[in-house]
Image (cartoon, grey):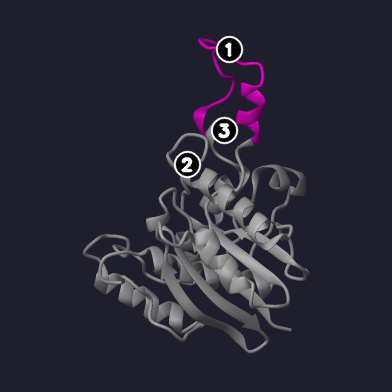
């Protein structure tokens, strides 16, 4: 069975969104196209246009938090300005999946409860809602490789590169073209990239979207680490990364 996969490097500004389209099957994963968002063609519309011509199950792999820390939410319910907050900042602002990835992979994702990544998370959830409206289909989170319909997972490209032993130092820098090309070559040895990745000379957005497809590949092969506490993950979200 072939599964359509879409990788999205999320951002609050559509011009900084990268997205990539591909397919997963028993033969492996093929990247068919990578692109950058724009104000003229919003990412949600571009993704909906591509999916409108596809059949079968589809997995969206999104590089953005899709939930917030449960302890923070509980602490703020009855909080008044000037009151203290019970618990350390790390406990309140980080999710269980953030702590898990730090322990198992050695990468610290941004704190959605404290950093500007919250705006990216908000934009990612808006993108999902726009896709539901444009496609007139429900989108729920996937928790196992076997599924039907249209599903989404949260991924973290930096952690995926570490899990595969791919050196990524400097690939996000403006002058990091050589590093980006090195990363793209390494990713291309794991999944097939049939089309050029745009803006490799100056940006990593489209490349990150392709890395999201690699993370989806790991998930669909059953090689990504799942949550121990499903109830907490359902509330906060979960980053799917291949076990090292």
- Please state the horizontal and vertical placement of residue 132, each as a whole percent of the image: 67, 56
Q: Is residue 198 left or right of residue 128?
A: left
Pair 3/1: label in front: 1
Q: In the displayed structure, does residue 55 sit left or right of residue 170?
A: right
The residue that mark 3 highlights is 91
Task: Check disc 1 and report its element: helix, strand or loop.
Answer: loop
Q: Which mark is drawn over residue 224?
A: none
Residue interval drawn in magenta: 70-90
Q: Identify the residue at image location x=64%, y=29%.
A: 73
The Cα atoms of the two marked residues, 3 and 2, are separated by: 20 Å
Q: Is 20 located above or below residue 27 in the figure? A: above
Q: Give the Cα separation between the discs numbered 3 and 1.
A: 19 Å
- For residue 119, the mark is 2
Q: Pick whichever, 207 or 70, lies toward us.
A: 207
- Seen at 31% across and 72% down, the residue is 200
> Can you say which quadrant of the picture contains the N terminus?
bottom right
**Answer yes or no: do the residues labelled 3 and 2 have beta carbons within 8 Å?**
no
């Amino acid at each position: 069975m072939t599964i359509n996969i879409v990788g999205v490097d999320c951002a609050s500004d559509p011009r900084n969104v990268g997205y990539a389209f591909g397919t997963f099957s028993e033969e492996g994963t093929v990247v068919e196209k990578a692109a950058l968002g724009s104000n003229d063609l919003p990412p949600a519309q571009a993704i909906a246009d591509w999916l409108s011509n596809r059949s079968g199950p589809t997995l969206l792999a999104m590089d953005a938090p899709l939930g917030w820390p449960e302890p923070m939410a509980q602490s703020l319910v009855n909080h008044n300005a000037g009151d203290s907050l019970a618990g350390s900042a790390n406990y309140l602002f980080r999710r269980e999946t953030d702590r898990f990835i730090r322990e198992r992979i050695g990468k610290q994702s941004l704190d959605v409860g404290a950093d500007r990544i919250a705006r990216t998370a908000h934009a990612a959830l808006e993108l999902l809602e726009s896709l539901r409206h444009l496609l007139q289909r429900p989108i729920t989170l996937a928790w196992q490789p076997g599924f039907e319909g249209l599903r989404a997972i949260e991924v973290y490209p930096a952690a995926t590169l570490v899990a595969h032993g791919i050196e990524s130092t400097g690939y996000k820098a403006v002058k990091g073209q050589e590093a980006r090309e090195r990363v793209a070559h390494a990713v291309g040895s794991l999944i097939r990239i049939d089309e050029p990745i745009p803006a490799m000379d100056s940006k990593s957005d489209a490349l990150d979207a392709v890395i999201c497809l690699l993370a989806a590949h790991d998930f669909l092969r059953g090689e990504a680490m799942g949550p121990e506490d499903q109830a907490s993950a359902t509330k906060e979200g979960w980053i799917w990364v291949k076990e090292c």
